[in-house]
Image: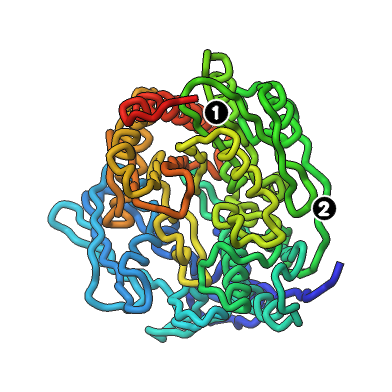
């Protein structure tokens, strides 16, 4: 191991308590959980200091949960700022999921004409109105990628001072010092730069589950997301690539954000790949309540029979696939391209098992296309099972497998060979690629709040389908989406779940930017990047679900594959394509 940086940081709450003197009165906003902030308030009160310590992260949500009394309130109006340096709906998004937490009270979000960092809240009860001003402390700054951000920040306001000023918190200082140290390290000039860049942070914040779906307020999860994507941007800039370039191959970036008792610390090290694989108990496939162990995935795959083919990941781990030849029009089925999207892996195996039992079915199945990412996901789940863990999203090269091709891979084709082989052996013209996305809000609080280049996926909005097709397959694309969504609509409870999430999404995001076909949000676009003329991508809100919700997720993934397979037989027959 090579140590790059380590440091401990004085906790901001401790500093506030230590420096306060009897008779003082102040307000502060920090990145701490409710229990810690209230404990600091009590310690200050014992010193004779009157203090209110609020959350700098999602301040409006916390104001409603901790301070605002809704007894008798009939309507709520939120007037939010629109800052020129942030997306127009940024502060509306930051209030999520408030609309689902206020019960039957009517709530409306309206833009203010200015970008000042506060919310106007108007509570109406009969003919009476109460007007409140909720501060949302932010700063405008340029990040290490050269982008200007409007980001939440700590704040301090003494009694009698209407404005106050920025308070640089431990949370912000840890992030900035760590990123600066990584930027300053003498990296080589050629990708990949490392095997694993490990950032281990100890932070005392507790996660706070919310009584809405899978929602949770998690400062530690948010820090993981900010570290991971900010460091991708650091290496995109170093390599001369544009921000968001998914072909970047820096190596595996792994933030491990663990809960401490009280300290705030970070250690950054370069590590070699670990060959260890987390083992889990065997589960019945149809009722699996959590992600399967990799060993079970491959045993189930072997049990499907068919012609085996394989490839190797960068770490040396083998990924496996099967080809079932038949007389039908062939379909490629894959899962685990992004292995923190876990229901697709189980759904692919379940669908393949059912297709195997039919006559003349013709398909390939590669349920775990990114075993290195899956190993990271299984490892990170031990400490934080309810976090998204986007560090597991990409391969050990650090790239998105989708964007690696035979032409640009150089010596690093690795996992992508399995997909190219599947297309070669089957001749399939349809690829069903099973994915997921966060089942609760996804944020980057220290880099503008809304995840850069992923703004559409910051909030859950039901089971989402994406269809990419060649230009001359537009009619068939519409047919496929219609047939698949009609089939999915018959699954008990799925449409109702979609409707709940879409309604909440629309309240907090405003415009949706997607079509709804038979109750399912969809995007369909011409894309000639794929050699297969039709690619159906599922996006189930699954990254942190377990138990019954996990079962519902992989059942929906399975049904999507089966519906697409059956529809494909009709579509290809109508187009005059002769099956094998």
The x and y percentages for residue 297 are 69, 32
Q: Looking at the image, is 573 positioned above or below residue 72?
A: above
Compare marks 2 and 1 and give the one earlier in the sequence.
2
The x and y percentages for residue 184 are 71, 83
Coloration mode: rainbow
Q: In which quarter of the image is the N terminus?
A: bottom right
Instruction: Please give left or right for residue 401 compared with residue 515 in the image.
Output: right
Q: Looking at the image, is 189 positioned above or below residue 554?
A: below
Task: Tell me the number on the disc at residue 177.
Answer: none
Q: Which numbered mark, 2 or 1, is in the foreground of this view?
A: 1
Q: Identify which residue, 290 or 124, lies in the foreground.
A: 290
Judge whether residue 453 can be spotted in this image. Answer: yes
Instruction: Please give left or right for residue 13 compared with residue 280 in the image.
Output: left
* Residue to which mark 1 is pinned: 363
Residues packed near mark 2 inside 10 Å, few (<14), some (14 to 19) or many (20 plus): few
* Residue to which mark 2 is pinned: 274
């Amino acid at each position: 191991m090579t140590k790059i940086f380590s440091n401990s940081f004085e906790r901001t709450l401790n500093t506030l308590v230590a420096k306060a003197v009897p008779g003082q009165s102040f307000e502060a906003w920090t990145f701490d959980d409710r229990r810690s902030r209230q404990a600091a308030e009590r310690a200050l009160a014992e010193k004779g200091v009157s203090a209110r310590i609020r959350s700098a992260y999602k301040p409006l949500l916390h104001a409603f949960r901790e301070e605002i009394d809704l007894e008798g309130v009939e309507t709520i109006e939120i007037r939010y700022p629109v800052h020129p340096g942030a997306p127009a709906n940024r502060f509306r998004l930051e209030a999520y999921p408030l609309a689902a937490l206020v019960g039957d009270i009517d709530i409306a979000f309206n833009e203010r004409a200015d970008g000042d960092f506060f919310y106007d809240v108007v509570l109406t009860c009969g003919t009476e109105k109460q007007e409140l001003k909720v501060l949302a402390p932010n700063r405008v700054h340029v990040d290490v990628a050269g982008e200007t951000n409007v980001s939440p920040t700590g704040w301090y306001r003494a009694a009698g001072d209407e404005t106050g000023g920025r308070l640089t918190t431990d949370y912000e200082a840890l992030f900035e010092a760590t990123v600066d140290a990584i930027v300053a390290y003498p990296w080589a000039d050629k990708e990949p730069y490392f095997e694993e860049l490990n950032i281990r942070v100890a932070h005392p914040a507790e996660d706070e589950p919310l009584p809405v779906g899978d929602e949770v307020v998690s400062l530690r999860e948010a820090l993981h997301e900010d570290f991971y994507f900010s460091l991708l941007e650091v290496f995109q800039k170093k390599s001369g690539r544009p921000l968001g370039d998914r072909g970047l191959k820096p190596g595996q970036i792994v933030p491990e954000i663990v809960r401490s008792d009280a300290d705030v610390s970070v250690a950054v090290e370069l590590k070699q790949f670990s060959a260890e694989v987390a083992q889990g108990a065997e589960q019945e496939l149809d009722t699996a309540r959590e992600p399967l162990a990799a060993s079970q995935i491959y045993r189930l795959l072997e049990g499907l029979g068919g012609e085996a083919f394989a490839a190797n990941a960068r770490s040396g781990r083998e990924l496996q696939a099967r080809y079932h030849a038949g007389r039908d029009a062939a379909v490629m089925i894959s899962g685990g391209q992004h292995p923190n999207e876990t229901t697709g892996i189980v759904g692919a195996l379940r669908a393949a098992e059912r297709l195997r039992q039919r006559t003349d079915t013709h398909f390939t199945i590669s349920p775990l296309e990114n075993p290195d990412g899956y190993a990271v996901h299984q490892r990170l789940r031990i400490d934080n099972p309810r976090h998204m863990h986007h560090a597991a999203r990409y391969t050990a090269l650090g790239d998105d497998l989708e964007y690696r091709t035979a032409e640009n891979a150089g010596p690093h084709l690795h996992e992508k060979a399995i997909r190219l082989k599947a297309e070669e052996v089957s001749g399939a013209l349809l690829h069903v690629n099973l994915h997921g996305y966060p089942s609760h809000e996804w944020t980057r609080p220290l880099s503008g709040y809304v995840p850069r280049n992923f703004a559409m996926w910051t909030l859950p909005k039901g089971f989402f389908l994406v269809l990419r097709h060649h230009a001359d397959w537009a009619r068939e694309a519409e047919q496929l989406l219609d047939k698949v969504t009609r089939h999915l609509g018959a699954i008990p409870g799925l449409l109702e779940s979609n409707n709940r999430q879409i309604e909440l999404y629309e309240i907090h995001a405003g415009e949706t930017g997607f079509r709804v076909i038979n109750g399912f949000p969809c995007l369909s676009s011409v894309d000639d990047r794929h050699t297969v003329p039709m690619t159906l991508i599922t996006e189930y809100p699954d990254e942190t679900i377990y138990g019954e919700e996990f079962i519902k997720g992989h059942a929906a993934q399975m049904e999507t594959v089966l519906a697409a397979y059956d529809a494909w037989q009709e579509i290809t027959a109508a187009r005059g394509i002769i099956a094998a």
